[in-house]
Amino acid sequence: MMNDLDLIGRLGPACSRAIPHGVKKTVEHMRASPGPKMTMGELVQVCGVPERTLHKHFRAFIGLSPLAYWRRLRLAAVRERLLAAADGESVSKVAMRHGFEHFGRFSTQYRRCFGESPSSTLRRARTAALCAASERGSAIGSDQARVLRLPTGPARERPSVAVLPFHASATNAEQRAFAESLAEGIATALAHVRSLAVVIPSPMSLTSHYPRRLAPRLGARYCIIGRTTQAGDRVRVIVRLVDAATEHHLWGDSYDGEVVDPFGLQDRVTEGVVRAIVPNIRGAEIERARRKQPSDLDAHDLAMRALPFAFATNLDATTQALDLLHRAMEIDPDYALPVALAAWCHAQLITHNGTPSPAEEKARALRLIERATVLGADDPLVVTAQCAVYTMVGEHDIAAILLDRALALDPTSAWAWERSGWLKTYIGEVDTAIRHFHRAIQLDAPHSPNANRFVGIGCAHFDAGRYEAGAFWMRRATLEQPGTVWVNRTLAISYARMGEHIAARDSLEALRRYRPDLTIAQIVGALPFRRDFMDRVAEGLDDLGLPP
């Protein structure tokens, strides 16, 4: 599969010009270089452009000078190592290993970046490791505490899930084989979801301990466990998703079928599990980050905390998301996810008429999404954010290619299907758009916010001239999230076309309270719909009395 930069480079001049080759080469060299020392002369030689040009491009696309970016990478690596709390490690030893020879200067830089001293980081990590080892030791015996210690590594690694062998209550060989095939089929299907790391235990790793105790030993944060029961010709499969650290039940379901149709039942179980796992694990990751103390938050935690705000589709939530995401970028400048999500938030400010300077916000969104492309990641969330930004700035051809890639990385991604719905709405394929919005609703976890999807369905009906259906879905969005006031741009027109003039007037007044200075030109300039759609919006708002 081509990487992000290769992909964008093939999409067209508007996109390929934006990413300097020197920045790409320099970032790749920094990531690959094992040594703690690096000079501008070395970077200039690697990238093949003058030093002044490299400085200019790094400032534009990364937000830091090349050596400042390199220092941030080393600071992040030091923090990662301190959080691992390895025996025999000291702050000075770790700092020296990463090229920080002046300890006082290093401590100042570390505190400025992470909000605490490096010794505080190490002390907290060791305390947490001792507590965790003590808890695990009391549960399963002190001789197993070291074996079950969770592996360390970058906090932004994909969440890991272990698919443990299913238990068959029946003793016959056919039922045992069916249970084994269920676990294998689920693991195989999940392996295609790039947002997860799937772990399959080998027979040698299985012990008599309760299965959930196996997950930490396998390096998995979550585990899927299940069992099958048979009564006559009927078979029931019960599947559960469990947090391995807390043993909390996160999701579960049961599936019934006939003994004579084991493959049909297996397919239904696999489809149901794969569809449910990603949104429930993401919800658990968000909750895990929410429970942490502010001093313990790393870049991944901050990105997870920001996700609900980024998806909330109102200005206050978008502002909160941007605060969290910019803090994440300060901690880990090499992490693509917060950069991509911040780009998406800036793009939302434009389309929701939430900024007095849409041109500046567009420039910020494009600069950040280009930076996320430079950093590169096969994270479906990152690629979907790229698709969303290019959709919202009207680059629909680029967005379509990125969307195909996002769905290839994770066909169960509710956000990717939602963005597909919006893209189809913008280009006028309204019936397909409505199907994709409903698919996004079905794929997401229960009680997930759907206001943006409801607005999309409403806009698709509006485009098709079905104003009553459009008003129903847009009104439903405002009931779920009252902050989605910008929907009144089309809701007021829908009411007017239906002859409900009082409702249309009230809807327009709500829009005026949202942005008292809003004009028709600002609304039309913010939306990437087809010309016919925008002409109807302009005409409808003009009839209602909004200033041109």
Image: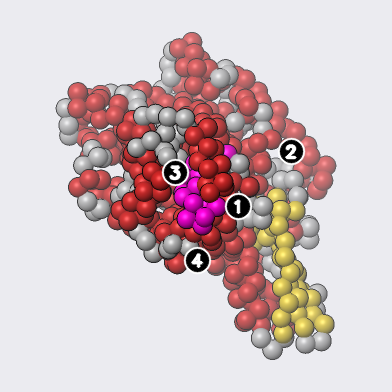
Dot 4 crowding, Cα within 10 Å, few <14, some 14–19, many 20+: some
Q: Tell me the kind of residue under disc 2.
A: Ala
Q: Is residue 173 left or right of residue 469?
A: right
Quarter of the rendering containing residue 131: top right
Label 3 element class: helix
- Residue 530: in sight, yes or no? no
Q: Does the magenta-highlighted stretch encompass residue 493?
A: yes
Whether 391 is drawn above or below 32: the answer is: below
- Start and end of the magenta stretch? 483-500
Front label number (2 vs 4): 4
Q: Which residue is mark 4?
A: 435
Image quadrant containing the N terminus:
bottom left
Question: In the rendering, at what x and y percent does residue 511 appear?
Answer: 50, 38
| Residue marked by disc 3 | 544
Q: Where residue 319 appears, x then y in whole percent?
A: 51, 31
Q: Nearer the viewer, residue 211 or 9?
A: 9
Q: Which mark is residue 60?
A: none
Distance between mark 1 and mark 2 Cα atoms: 49 Å
Label 2 – label 3 distance at C-alpha: 67 Å
Q: Are marks 3 and 1 in contact (CB under 8 Å)?
A: no
Q: Give the residue at mark 2.
A: 133
